[in-house]
Image (cartoon, helix red, strand yellow):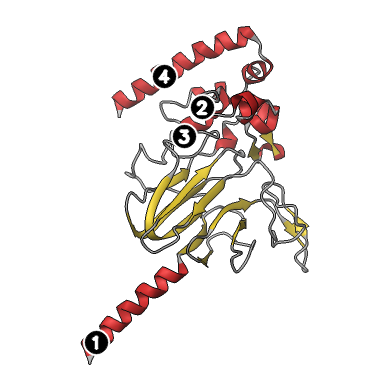
Amino acid sequence: MGRPNLIITLFTLFIVKGVTGAKFTFINKCSYTVWPGILGQPTLDTTGFELVNGNSRSLQAPLGWSGRFWGRTGCNFDQSGHGSCTTADCGSGQIECNGAGATPPATLAEFTLGSSSTAQDFYDVSLVDGYNLQMIVEVSGGSGDCGTTGCVDDLNRRCPNELKAASGGGCRSACEAFGTAEYCCKGDFGSPQSCQPSSYSQVFKMACPRSYSYAYDDATSTFTCTAADYVITFCPSLQSGQNRKGVTKPVNGSVLSPLKGLFSNSSLYADLATGDSTAVNRSATVSLVIVFLIFVTFLVL
């Protein structure tokens, strides 16, 4: 009787996994409370909740679920759950987002689950709508490439002045800041061929190489896995020795730290946004310097 019972148990687990899709576990390693927001179809058990420092919470999603997660910061809700947040607020006036998305700037984790237990999930961490806090997505179980993605670097510390938002608590995208077609990849710039990385998106990409830095940043930013669960960590801390060429990026004291002042103090980016030709020439020089420093970095590593 033991063997048949084991077979039945395994079969039941397989069926349950196939029906339920994926489990998403949220972990808050920030020194402050984060309020995750959720937008997707079909609606999960909650569309927004409070997650204090050191806590975690899991949600189950069905096959074929598609949506996004983000972390709201600086929130103030009363006892009835009414209030708002400083960054990534969803505008519902409540802890629950109730079908509303994040107000930029917001770091987004995006998922489209496979429609069957053998179909691939697609996932990414996007900075296309800007950045407000560190986030990584890790895979639990599953088969395929199943890479870790996200942004470990604190972009708020190197955000160009003209992109800063929420008193330094967020970093806007160039599209949101300037609204031009070339930054927003619209109109005449609405294709991968015509919409190329900007100086702003390159700042994002250098800090977070596995995250979407602009609309057509697919090649290095979209990941796949089959029959997996996912762990979404806010303010992650990587252990010593973890992959330097993955989500890990230079921080203060690293070989690229001299660039921090260049990225965070500059009218150069504002000049580029308004088409100043002198600034464009300086930008080309800056790009060559950046490429040289990256080359030296890889030689050292």
Q: Is residue 143 left or right of residue 132?
A: left
Q: CA distance from mark 3 to mark 2?
A: 16 Å
24 over 69 or under it: above or below: below
Q: CA distance from mark 4 to mark 3?
A: 18 Å
216 over 235 or under it: above or below: above
Q: Earlier in the sequence, mark 4 or mark 3?
A: 3
At label 4, the amino acid type is Val
Closer to viewer: mark 4 or mark 1:
1
Q: Earlier in the sequence, mark 4 or mark 2?
A: 2
- In the structure shown, which secondary structural element does the residue marked by tag 1 occupy? helix
Residue 48 at x, y percent in the picture: 64, 61
Do we see residue 234 in this rendering? Answer: no
* Residue designated by label 4: 291
Q: Is residue 90 left or right of residue 15?
A: right
Q: CA distance from mark 4 to mark 1?
A: 62 Å
Q: Residue at x 57, y 53 (%)?
A: 68
* Residue designated by label 1: 4
Q: How many labels, in total?
A: 4
Residue closest to the far bottom: 1
- In the structure shown, which secondary structural element does the residue marked by tag 2 occupy? helix
Task: Rate crowding at label 2 as few (under 14), some (14 to 19) or many (20 or more) other CA atoms within 10 Å.
Answer: some
The circle drawn on residue 251 is 3
